[in-house]
Image (cartoon, grey):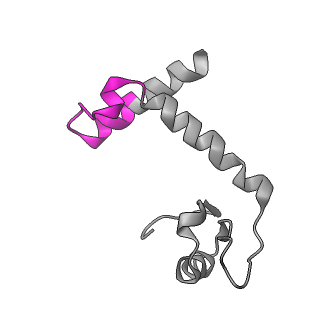
Amino acid sequence: MEGVCAEVVIGDKGYDSDELVESIQAKGAEAVIPPKKNRKVQRQYDADRYKDRNLVERFFSKVKQYRRVATRYEKTARNFLAFVHVASIMILLR
């Protein structure tokens, strides 16, 4: 997470570690990561914000339906990002 500035970091239970949550909070962001069931001390998290993770994952699933994005045909990062934008626009226009 070096060089990434965010207000909220959303992750699944696989990222539930005290070290990661503390590093996120040290950067001034909110960690929205549900605790594992076997955790001795259960942490609180914002369940409403965690629901947004589903929207993001469904969006990425739709973007990967475009072959150029899934296989990364573009050689430069600039061209790849441009095609991700095109694919995003096509999804939004459906």
Examine the rendered structure and indicate whether residue 77 appears above or below residue 47.
above
Count every numbered label the image shows and give the total: 0
User: What quarter of the picture does the N terminus occupy?
Assistant: bottom left
- Percent of width and height locating residue 35: 67, 71
User: What quarter of the picture does the C terminus occupy?
Assistant: top right
Front residue of 27 and 49: 49
Q: Residue at x 34, y 33 (%)?
A: 70
Q: Does the magenta portion include 81?
A: yes
Q: Residue at x 74, y 77 (%)?
A: 43
Examine the rendered structure and indicate whether residue 27 appears above or below residue 48.
below
Q: Does the magenta portion include 57?
A: no
Corner quadrant of residue 8: bottom right
Q: Which range of residues does the magenta coloring cover? A: 65-83
Q: Residue at x 68, y 71 (%)?
A: 37
- In this view, the residue farthest toward the top is 94
Front residue of 2 and 58: 58
